[in-house]
Amino acid sequence: MSTAAGPISEETVKLFMDYGQFCIDGGLGNPDEEIDLLDRALAAHPFASDGLAMVVLSPHQNNFRMLITVQVWGARPPWDRNEWQQVCEARLRVGPEETLYLSSPTDGAADCPVPEGEYLIEVSGRGFINYGWPGSTKPGDVWRIRLWPDDGSEPLQAVQWSMPGYGVPEDVPIAERSVSAETEECEWVTVIDEDGPRHLHISEFREQAAAAERQRWGGDPIPELRDCSGAEELSGYDRALAEAIAAMGEQDLRRLARWSATQACEKASIAERPWVQAALTALQEGRPLPPPFDDMEAASARLHDEDFGPVDEGGTELVASLVRAHPRESAPNPFDLGPIHRASFALPTIVDAAEPEARDAAMTTLYATALVFGPEVDVLLAAIRTEFGLPPR
């Protein structure tokens, strides 16, 4: 049997992670129990486990290309917790299918071979930008899973990432669920909101959900943009501009993506840094992005080192400025997230703008750029109209 000198096996998988969570299952977990594990994880961040499955909370709301390295060891591997921002440990049983299954809400699914057995499992993540929306659908955080035979020792206490200037999110107590029907085909649902519990017929519930969606979009959802990041927020805030973008051809969409990335970097005051400037030039010329943009984790790490300085035992010394938003007196601004580190939101737009699908590249990049502008988003949207010859708002 291998010792802790090195892993027995190692494989890297890519997971479409959404809703700030993913599940690890050895093939014996019950999918119906995942919601209970999620409730427990939210009540005691950053994870929950029942020995058959494990729900892990990610600081990032999403990462549609989240890289996870899975290692199997013969004994407890070397300690390196100081190199990771979040670490959690639990027991996990892998069944006779000898497969470790990874999943996340919507489209997330990946798996890799792991021998049947009783394990201790350690899940570590790093490369975090923000709690919640990270400014991109591919923010560059990476994860590692290490498994080794259960030796009877107790799992170590979890480490949760403390975001500079913010800390950690509060635990959310488990809420009681309401049973809304006594038959398999329920006709009524119980809705609990600020007015308290009330009963709705399923048809009325669907009508209200559709009406709420139309309100968020500022009209009917725009089919061309429905699956694009930030499209709902843009349409609800500036419907005419969203419709104009939906009608753009591929050439204009590509130009919008490149233009938005440049605006984001200039607004965040990073466009003149030589390594960022080289990437923006390559983006404009249609060439492959130079290092470190071939590895978003490396690019984020370089930005962090430049803006926040070295990390020591006392934590991270903040040497960059956070931009504080000012409340609007008119309609709510969905792009105003309050105090943010603009550069962290701007940097991923360079990679987003180079995505192969033009409409996704344009909307993802524009949405992140709008977050960089935040309370000044109207300046950005007016500039788009000028740049692309669109009628004023």
Image (spheres, rainbow, N blue to C red):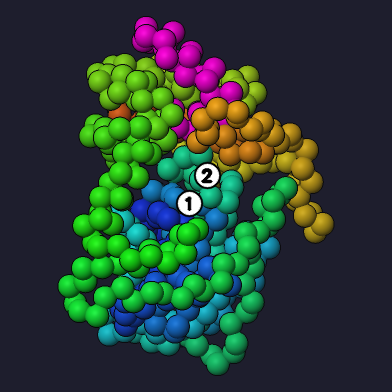
Q: Could you tell me which quadrant the C terminus lies in? A: top left
- The secondary structure making up most of the magenta span is helix
- The quarter holding residue 204 reads bottom left
- Front position in the image: 183 or 284: 183
Q: Give the residue drawn at x 35%, y 59%.
A: 105
Q: Which mark is residue 61?
A: 1
Q: Is residue 274 magenta?
A: no
Q: Give the residue drawn at x 55%, y 27%.
A: 330
Name the residue tied to disc 2: 134
- Front position in the image: 277 or 22: 22
Q: Amino acid at mark 2?
A: Pro
Give me the C-alpha separation between circle 2 and circle 1: 7 Å
Q: Amino acid at mark 1?
A: Gln
Q: Give the residue drawn at x 44%, y 8%.
A: 386
SS state under label 1: loop
Q: Bounds of the magenta span? A: 366-393
Residue 278 appears in the rendering: no
Percent position of residue 113, x then y? 32, 72
Q: Give the residue drawn at x 45%, y 83%.
A: 50
Percent position of residue 158, x then y? 62, 72
Percent position of residue 194, x then y? 50, 58
